[in-house]
Amino acid sequence: MTKKQKKEVILTLKNNEIYNLSIIGFINENPIGKFVQNENSFFVKGKDGDGWVYFAGGDETEFISSINNLTAEDKYFGALDDWMIPIIIKNREVDWLINAYQFHFPGDKLIPENKIRTRKLTTKDSEFIVSQSVYKKMLSIKYLNERINKSVSAGIYEDKKLVAWALTHDDSSLGSMHVMENYRGKGYAKEVSISLIKQCREINKIPFLQCETKNIPAQNLVEKLGFVKDRNVTWLKLK
């Protein structure tokens, strides 16, 4: 996928920008190994790493046409609509599936002020972050190093120890937020989130994230911050 193609596709996707935030972020952040454009839809696959596959636009007929571009090696799928799942998993076995809500921070919403100092993470933090994550099977030190170097992040340190953090995924969504157990209840999750919102605004990106549907505390937090729920998404890995 050439730079010119990227610009043209992203321009089209921005006609429905909020809905397409995840695929826009992925195209912006990653080299694309496979790209197929139908009349009203797009199929993209990342060139590096796990080769995540994203779809955008079109109806079921065009989606099924896009599915014909898949091979047995295509196992990772991002930001899917609910109706896409039965079509993709037909005759294939699911390894894991995550249902989530997408939230975005509206452009006219005022950002709360930080009450606690945060600072950008460094790659020295990556090993520790992976060790503490509940998503160890989906994270690697290499991946975190790339995210820290390429995008926004925020950490809170006490006595030179990292106790709370958040950064972005490779679709530019805010995520990997964690507060060490002994430091919870101090508002640290809110503080690192505010920092990321500010940093995204500074580089003219819409802050957005996805919360698992079962993670009610996280949903409550982001809604209190001013995020608005805009769609359901599913993340899927096939065997």
Image (cartoon, rainbow, N blue to C red):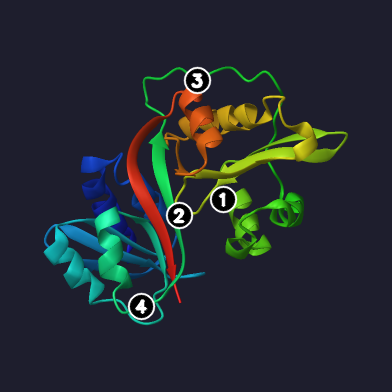
Q: Amino acid at mark 1?
A: Lys
Q: Nearer the viewer, mark 1 or mark 4?
A: 4
Sequence-earlier tag: 1 or 4: 4
Instruction: Tell me, for residue 34, which label it has, or none.
Output: none
As drawn, 8 above or below 104: below
Q: CA distance from mark 2 to mark 1?
A: 8 Å
Q: Report the residue at 65% width, 56% height from top.
A: 145
Residue 107 relative to residue 203: left or right: left
Q: What residue is pinned by disc 3?
A: 111
Q: Residues within 10 Å of mark 3 (few under 14, many from 20)?
A: some
User: Disc 1 vs disc 3: Cβ atoms closer than 8 Å?
Assistant: no
User: Disc 4 vs disc 2: Cβ atoms closer than 8 Å?
Assistant: no
User: Disc 4 vs disc 3: Cβ atoms closer than 8 Å?
Assistant: no
Q: What residue is pinned by disc 4?
A: 92
Residue 67: x, y in percent?
24, 72
Q: What residue is pinned by disc 1?
A: 150
